[in-house]
Image: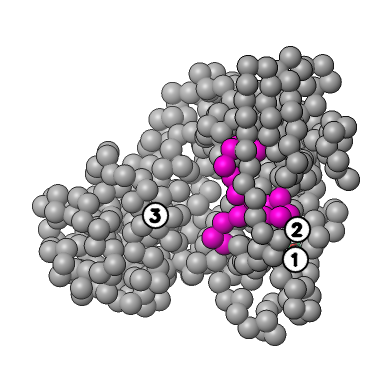
Amino acid sequence: MNLNDSISALGIRNSIDVLNHGWEEAQECFPGGALPFLSERFIESSCRYLNVPSEILQQVLKCARSIAGNKYLTGLAWYFHYSLFKRDDYPQKNVNMWPSIAALSESMREDAGLFYFLIFLSGLEKLVEYMNNVGERRSIPSQIIHDTIFETVRYFPTYFKETGGFPPGSLRFRVYVNFGGEYFVIGRLAYHLNAFKGKLRAFRHRKNKCVVAISEDGVRYLSNGQRDGPGRLLRDGGTWVSTLTETDDAIEGHPILPTGEAVPEQVRLTKSEWFQVLAPGDTVLEIHIPGGGGMTHELCGKSLKAALDFFPRYFPDRSFSGLSCISWILDAELQELLSSTSNMVLFQKEFHLFPALSDDKCLLVKAFGQEFKDISNLPRETKLQRALYEKLAVGSYPSSKAGGGFLLTEDFHWGAQVYLNRTPDFLDVSV
Ligand SMILES: CC(C)(COP(=O)(O)OP(=O)(O)OC[C@H]1O[C@@H](n2cnc3c(N)ncnc32)[C@H](O)[C@@H]1OP(=O)(O)O)[C@@H](O)C(=O)NCCC(=O)NCCS
């Protein structure tokens, strides 16, 4: 199948560069005839295995029929399947650039939303086999392997609400992270052995054990101490850029408060008193939160404790500094919107927050989904939706804050809000 003919027929010419990568090789290996992973039997048995709800199964079957009935879509489905499951060297980042659901809707209309889920199913057997091998090799309890394999479907309501289906970025995450062998669902939360992505270094005081976070050099902040970026709607007070200087005996830079704001005034930490405990790129347990509500304080604490036992036991070859999370769940604006007993607020107070790149529309998309255009018609079913509605109704807008957090292994005392309660005197934090 010729790439130019395919992208013209499907209205996805903008994707030519990314699809050009390995297209010919994939088409040369096209098996001919009907693709087995588009058959009703295959889809029904894979969906049954994953406990996919029956209404979604019907939509997946419809999507498969629409692909099988169009030679260009069949060629594209084969290219996706081949790149992910028949090659070992396909660049992961390319998957994020595959045509969006909206672009595929040109030719597939409502069937576009599940195209990439079908591709995920096409490699499910291989993915499950890989996870079972990891489990056996490391003697990981079968319940954890089971929960990790079955996580995808828990995210379905979120996928549909936020993007209208299963987007290419979710396919990438599922194939390379969820089934990557270093990601596990442990109780309520999931954990990925990964590099720390915060733009900061953390230091511990040698005697009193306090922790201070200092911004990396060259990070642009808004006047309220939050990260600047393309998703910011207001830059009223201008912006400033951090500097960090390290000499033989000290570190000088801008502290980040445990509440998640970077401070324009600098502090100086002497190395005789402070030592580094976290830096960008250090291995951490990156936390992910599977959907389904109910991330209660108790369940989260139990899960974190279990994760801190699990990884040293089953991955003794991989040391890590602590836990980290970058998510809308750590958006400190939630503290303004929700009560102090909300699960998300309780969760974020246990972490040392830090500013992450964020989009000011993020909370609205998370609460209302992609359809939050007409304010008067917004659903007001949950406390979060009602709080956001009230804000919008008076012409105010939520501005995203913090979004990242870390909790070092040594500081894990769930419920103690360690970083808020053990702040050095020179940092002014009102809890
Ligand atoms: C994260 C999550 C588990 C939090 O739910 P929770 O445990 O109910 O959290 P809270 O107690 O803090 O919620 C406070 C209120 O906000 C509501 N709320 C929470 N998340 C909401 C969302 N995404 N949309 C609308 N309302 C939401 C809750 O229903 C609750 O209101 P209620 O008491 O009227 O029911 C939930 O949003 C979820 O399942 N999300 C999908 C997965 C996800 O976003 N993962 C993170 C990926 S980065």
User: Quick check: is 226 in the magenta stretch?
Assistant: yes
Magenta: predominant secondary structure element? Answer: loop
**Crowdedness near tag 3: few (<14), some (14–19) or many (≥20) residues, C-alpha within 10 Å:** some
Which secondary structure, mark 3?
helix
Report which quarter residue 305 is drawn in. Answer: top right
205 versus 392 height, above or below: above
**Amino acid type, callout 1:** Leu
Determine whether label 2 and label 1 are within 8 Å by CB. Answer: yes
* Of residues 194 and 427, the one drawn nearer to the viewer in this rendering: 427
What residue is disc 2 on? 334
What residue is disc 1 on? 384
Report which quarter residue 202 is drawn in. Answer: top right
Write the residue at 47% across / 29% down: 135
In primary-sequence order, the first of circles 2 and 1 is 2
Write the residue at 62% across / 34% down: 244
In the image, ligand 1 is in what quadrant? bottom right
275 versus 422 height, above or below: above
Label 2 C-beta lies within 8 Å of the nearest ligand 1 atom: yes
User: Quick check: is 424 in the magenta stretch?
Assistant: no
Residue 96's label in the rendered image is 3
In the displayed structure image, the side of residue 103 where residue 146 appears, left or right = right
* Identity of the residue furthest to the top in this view: 272
